[in-house]
Amino acid sequence: MNRKTQIVVVGGGAGGLELVRRLGAKYGRKRHDIILVDKNLSHIWKPLLHEVAAGSLDANLDEVGYRDHCSRWGYRFFQGSLESIDRVARTISLAPVKDEDGSELIAGHTIRYDILVLALGSVSNDFGVPGVKEHCLYLDSREQADRFRTRLLNHCLRVSRAMLRDPSADEQVRVAIVGGGATGVELAAELYNAAAGLRHYGLEVFDESRLHVTLLEAGPRILPALPEKLADAARFELERLGVEVRPATQVVEARPRQLITRDGAVIEADLMVWAAGVKGADFLAGLGLETNARNQIIVTDTLQTTVDPNIFALGDCASYTPPGEGRPVPPRAQAAHQMAAVVFANIVRLQQGRPLKHFVYRDKGSLVSLSRFSTVGSLMGNLIGGSMAIEGRLARFIYTSLYRLHLIGIHGWVKATFLMAVGRVNRIVRPKLKLH
Ligand SMILES: Cc1cc2nc3c(=O)[nH]c(=O)nc-3n(C[C@H](O)[C@H](O)[C@H](O)COP(=O)(O)OP(=O)(O)OC[C@H]3O[C@@H](n4cnc5c(N)ncnc54)[C@H](O)[C@@H]3O)c2cc1C
């Protein structure tokens, strides 16, 4: 009896979930066995996490349950965290899944593969700065975003109660964000949006003037990936909201409620968020594949790993440097999306014995949302002949289109269109803030 070709994708994020949908739609369960493995039971698009953290988005409404998604698209789902790969036996090992009390729910097990795709994403890079792990929060996952929101709301409540007791009290919620890239900038603006709404939800004496956000960036300016003019526009907007923007400020240590800078300054904060760049998770370096100094798996132009053509890697966990370019493709949702399309095409070509496609990254530009206050960014493309700076409504429209494209990528046109319509209705009928 012919054994089914087993294609295993580990990581159901921006790239991996799109890939299994396409594989499931193409092959179904007849000739192939498509398996998705993820350590979580559901997917939330990472670029939404700053909104989840600020409370302006209810992740329950936007997350996608893998069990439901797989039954619709003809693949199988296993919950589990990848621990190791046996390239000789062609199996992966998953760690045991434990419940809240720490007791074992699913024992550790192995899964056979013919083709393996690693789409494991990234984690925040603390660059070994002492105290960051212990005292700062990250925005790498839904749990971390939820944790941030709970702590933020508790601080807001404390300040609100203190001001009710003594209206002359000068109480503030102090948030320090390390990293002036897109994540840090978007979070800073979103916090002011959320703080402005809190008084409508029971914290009558709280408003955005009670929030003090400090944005610290080691480089000479925020948003280094954007043209200077746009970064200046974003800084102007942030400062207008009340954010204290501190470029050329390198944090060298984190202590309880304190960040220490290279020049010895102490920044006091109730909540400290580390968003200063990403790297691959540490265990990637021990998988027996070639990795770079940031634990990312090095791939060839067909997105196969350098040591094993049966293993592909894509998205944030992969490192591909186009020929003649000194820099690898950046860890972005658009890169994960483009890589998923090429890995899909190459898996199909492998089955057909055809030559594989070469990955060419097309940078469509970068957009940064300053919540409802503004959106800035640059568009790239042949049509406009290079790079074009955009701001305002057009930029906002294109920014939200990225999420729409992701919805189409994981659900197909029909369901995605319904979900977008439901999203519009929800924005009208549901609370503007998630307060629990
Ligand atoms: C707050 C924030 C804002 C962002 N904004 C933007 C933006 O505006 N535009 C943009 O282009 N990019 C943005 N990004 C970056 C973008 O989210 C990532 O580049 C993109 O999600 C990468 O996709 P991926 O498929 O590689 O990984 P991910 O989407 O991170 O998915 C990785 C998956 O792997 C799973 N996983 C991890 N480890 C294991 C394991 N050991 N075993 C099993 N499963 C595992 C995870 O649970 C997850 O489902 C943002 C990121 C953040 C955090």
Image (cartoon, rainbow, N blue to C red):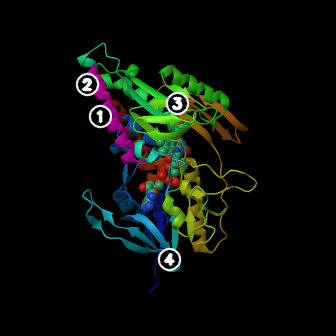
Badge 4: residue crowd in 10 Å (few <14, some 14–19, many ≥20): some
Q: Earlier in the sequence, mark 3 or mark 4?
A: 4
Answer whether residue 230 is magenta in the image. Answer: no
Q: Which residues are magenta?
A: 136-162
Q: Quadrant of the N terminus?
A: bottom left
Q: In the image, 358: left or right of 250?
A: right
**Mark 3 or 4: the one toward you:** 3
Residue beneath label 3, please? 265
Residue beneath label 1, please? 435
- Alpha-carbon span between mark 4 and mark 1: 46 Å
Answer whether residue 145 is magenta in the image. Answer: yes
- Alpha-carbon span between mark 1 and mark 2: 10 Å
**Amino acid at dot 1:** Leu
Q: In the image, 110: left or right of 263?
A: left
- Alpha-carbon span between mark 3 and mark 1: 34 Å
On residue 90, which mark appears?
4
Q: Earlier in the sequence, mark 4 or mark 1?
A: 4
| Residue 403 visible (yes or no) | no
| Residue 228 visible (yes or no) | yes
| Residue name at image x 40 percent, y 74 percent | 110
**Amino acid at dot 4:** Arg
Q: Secondary structure at mark 2?
A: loop
On residue 202, which mark appears?
2
Q: Earlier in the sequence, mark 3 or mark 1?
A: 3
Badge 3: residue crowd in 10 Å (few <14, some 14–19, many ≥20): few
Q: Earlier in the sequence, mark 2 or mark 3?
A: 2
Q: Earlier in the sequence, mark 1 or mark 2?
A: 2
Which residue is at the front of the view, 423 or 55? 55
- Alpha-carbon span between mark 2 and mark 4: 56 Å
User: Residue 127 placed where, x, y %?
Assistant: 55, 48
User: Residue 29 placed where, x, y %?
Assistant: 42, 70
Q: Secondary structure at mark 3?
A: loop
